[in-house]
Image (cartoon, rainbow, N blue to C red):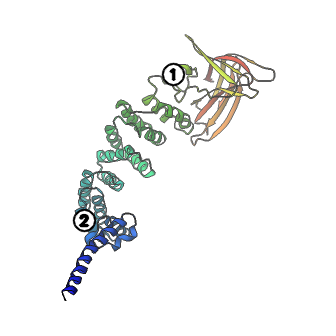
């Protein structure tokens, strides 16, 4: 009998030990496999709680979701995840005051949870607390997120002047995320919001890659965003040297400066060589083309209004037999970014007339081209007639 009792006690002890072990193993497995979560006994639910909460909310069972969220918070009070899930359920139940309180506590417990961030932003919008919205959106940009949801919420904030002010006030010595934000902002924000935002970044010493920005400017101008291109360059990288759209003078590439939105750029073309000579009267481009194909000496954007113009050139050009020495190609770009070659002008000392149409020509690309030959260009002038 004693032996039988001993065996019974042993089995009872083994079962008492096995149940917690199995419960804990199932809970750990639920961290990797949501399907295991319903099998975890209630006393051992830890990692299993989050998938159970998600499943309850997905079914529309907000009461169960809130109850499970409270259990999550009791078991794991430090992370923000539980409070964020609780806030979601409270919002679904119409209890916004409690949801705000839960979200504030979630914010105090950390920001690992993207859902928490998004909820705070949405509720800040609803209460028009622009400072909270700006803080949370900047937190998401700063961790390297660039998804469409973040961009949409940021655009919504920056449509409001108070939102722009709150966002700008939070900016500091940004580095890792500034280029991604600037690229998006240049394509999205109106000029006033853009100027206030990037101006604050510049004043606070944001680290910006002007090399990267310079490569994006021509596309911005050609897509109808010339004002944004000018704002970005003047606020962040121009250093006081900003070329006007109607200034067609040359700037040497040898001075170390980067080209702004309306500067001449000099693409690498096989067979074409250039030298720059600077004097009191300006910069002269000396060029040669040893290639049989016509190539670009320089290219730039401008903003000519609809109407008639005359183009003249101060140059000395020599083309080999059968090659036109100098040509100015004008290409129109619509505000949609669609390009259409307008005219090729054989440049000479006498003025040559051409016309900018009143439609689908919001900006223009000018390209100086040469066949085989050599020469120098002192200045190109374009004046309205």
Q: Position of residue 44 (x, y in %)?
A: 27, 69
Residue in view at x 35 percent, y 73 percent: 38
Residue at the disc numbered 1:
256
Residue 87: x percent and y percent? Answer: 28, 60
Q: What percent of the width, then of the height, locates residue 62?
A: 31, 69
65 relative position to 346: left or right? left
Residue at 66%, 23% (x, y): give it.
Answer: 311
Residue drawn 28% across the image and 51% down it: 110
Residue 7 showing in the rendered view: yes
Secondary structure category for the residue under label 1 = loop
Camera-side residue of 337 and 210: 210
Which of 260 and 107 lies nearest the eye of the viewer? 107
Up/down of 26 relative to 254, above or below: below
* Circle 2 Cα neighbour tier, 10 Å, few/some/many (<14 / 14–19 / ≥20): some
115 over 238 or under it: above or below:
below
CA gap between label 1 and label 2 equals 61 Å
């Amino acid at each position: 009998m004693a032996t039988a009792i001993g065996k019974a006690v042993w089995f009872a002890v083994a079962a008492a030990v096995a149940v917690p072990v199995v419960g804990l193993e199932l809970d750990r497995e639920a961290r990797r496999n949501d399907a295991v979560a319903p099998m975890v006994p209630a006393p051992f639910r830890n990692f299993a709680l989050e998938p159970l909460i998600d499943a309850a909310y997905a079914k529309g069972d907000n009461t169960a979701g809130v109850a499970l969220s409270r259990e999550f918070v009791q078991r794991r009070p430090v992370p923000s995840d539980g409070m964020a899930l609780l806030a979601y359920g409270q919002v679904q139940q119409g209890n916004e005051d409690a949801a705000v309180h839960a979200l504030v506590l979630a914010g105090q417990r950390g920001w690992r949870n993207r859902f928490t961030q998004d909820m705070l932003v949405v509720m800040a919008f609803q209460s028009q607390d622009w400072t909270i919205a700006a803080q949370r959106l900047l937190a998401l940009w700063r961790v390297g997120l660039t998804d469409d949801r973040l961009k949409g919420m940021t655009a919504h904030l920056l449509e409001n002047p108070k939102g722009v002010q709150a966002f700008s006030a939070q900016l500091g010595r940004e580095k890792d995320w500034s280029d991604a934000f600037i690229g998006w902002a240049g394509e999205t924000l109106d000029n006033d919001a853009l100027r206030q935002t990037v101006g604050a970044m510049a004043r606070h010493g944001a680290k910006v890659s002007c090399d990267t920005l310079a490569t994006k400017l021509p596309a911005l101008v050609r897509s109808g965003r010339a004002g944004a291109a000018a704002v970005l360059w003047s606020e962040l990288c121009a250093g006081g040297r900003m070329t006007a759209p109607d200034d067609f003078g040359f700037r040497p590439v040898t001075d170390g400066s980067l080209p702004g939105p309306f500067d001449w750029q000099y693409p690498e073309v096989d067979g074409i060589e250039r030298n720059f000579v600077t004097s009191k009267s300006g910069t002269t481009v000396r060029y040669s083309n040893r290639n049989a194909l016509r190539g670009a000496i320089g290219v730039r954007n401008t903003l000519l209004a609809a109407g008639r113009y005359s183009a003249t050139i101060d140059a000395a050009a020599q083309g080999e037999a059968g090659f036109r020495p100098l040509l100015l190609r004008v290409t129109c770009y619509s505000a949609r970014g669609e390009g259409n070659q307008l005219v090729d002008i054989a440049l000479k000392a006498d003025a040559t007339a051409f016309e900018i149409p009143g439609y689908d020509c919001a900006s223009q690309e000018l390209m100086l081209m040469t066949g085989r030959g050599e020469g120098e260009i002192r200045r190109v002038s374009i004046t309205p007639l």
